[in-house]
Amino acid sequence: MCQYSAVDGSAQDWHLMHLGQLAISGAGMLVIEATAVSAESRITPGCLGLYSDANEAALARVLRAIRSTSDIPVAMQIGHAGRKASSREPWNGGQLIPPGEPGAWLPSGPSALSHMPGEAPVHAMTADEIAALITQFAATAQRADRLGIDALELHGAHGYLLHSFLSPLANQRTDAYGGSLANRMRLVLEVFDAVRAVWPAHKPLGVRISASDWVEGGWDLDQSITLARELHARGCNWLDCSSGGLAPALQKITLGPGYQVPFAEAIRKAVPGLPIMAVGLITDPHQAEAIIASGQSDMVALARAMLYNPRWPWHAAAALGASVSAPKQYWRCAPREFPDVLGKVKTGQR
């Protein structure tokens, strides 16, 4: 979950505290929030980035603290905000910063179409700018490797740049990056190939997609399956299946527990061998366990539920009769009815 608390893209004390508590949560993997590949790639002026030496040094401090207290694998989402760039923080309304106001810059997209009605049209990227963008993704991946990040996830969902190139609702180009499905997928695949070329072979590389725009005539499940097959053939290590975010004024979503899980299940069945991650209103341990046990998904990711309860995995382990890794400083807090939940039998204490 984006924290909108960076300064010029650089992590602050908030990130150390925020990620530090999640690092000892007992989760199987910690994913650092969407991290911009350039200053213009940020959603808001407060978004995290990894495009400068200062960004890299600031995040290195955070990672040193995590590594000193936890052995949790640390992944990172990297991406470009596209049409949703140059926006205010959610607690300041979340709207596009009007052009010309302090802190504003010109958002980019596949075509000169605004993200929301009433907003100014964005800049339609040129071929040279697309080539530069691909290089920026690769450069950020190299910085992430130097930091010791264990895995990367390309953010191609929620209306951000890569998603907007995929969807015919946002992409009206007539060149090699628009029109046919193959052309609309081209940028995502080229970014994946460029990152995979510089990202160490032993480190996983996944992709997050919006499996559907939830708008007739937009990006949909069948196109997502085609993209999943292309990514699988290129060595993608997992596909994170979210949805929506490209056309908020048009999308028709029926919310409910696990409402996006059917997308994960359908793609998993259609593309055997590609590990799938399910996400979206998964809040109960038994619900999460059923998703995995029934074969709907290979992994489950939590976001808001973990922000609300950073010890969610501890409680899930207790509910499911399992145990999690926890710092020895906390071993004695295990409830008497679940003495082994923190991986240590509770003993007498002074």
Image (cartoon, rainbow, N blue to C red):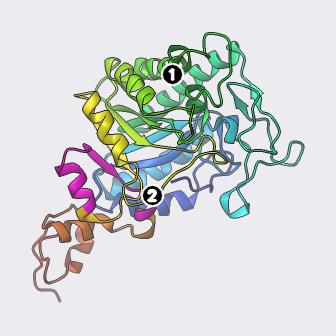
Q: Looking at this view, is 116 or 52 the one in front?
A: 116
Q: Which residue is mark 2?
A: 19
Task: Name which residue lies at 72% across and 25% down.
Answer: 111
Task: Name which residue lies at 66% across and 10% down.
Answer: 175
Circle number at residue 217: none
Amino acid at circle 2: Leu
Q: Quadrant of residue 341?
A: bottom left
The label nearer to you, 2 versus 1, is 1
Whether residue 326 is visible, yes or no, is no
Amino acid at circle 1: Val
**Left or right for 180, reference 149:** right
294 falls in the magenta region: yes
38 falls in the magenta region: no
Q: Position of residue 208 (x, y in %)?
A: 44, 37
Task: Name which residue lies at 46% across and 48% down.
Answer: 32
Image quadrant occupied by the C terminus: bottom left
Q: Quadrant of residue 23?
A: bottom left
**Left or right for 227, reference 217:** left
Residue 338 position (above or below residue 275) = below
Q: Looking at this view, is 246 or 238 the one in front?
A: 246
User: Which range of residues does the magenta coloring cover?
Assistant: 287-305
Q: Which residue is mark 1?
A: 191
Q: Position of residue 302 (x, y in %)?
A: 38, 56
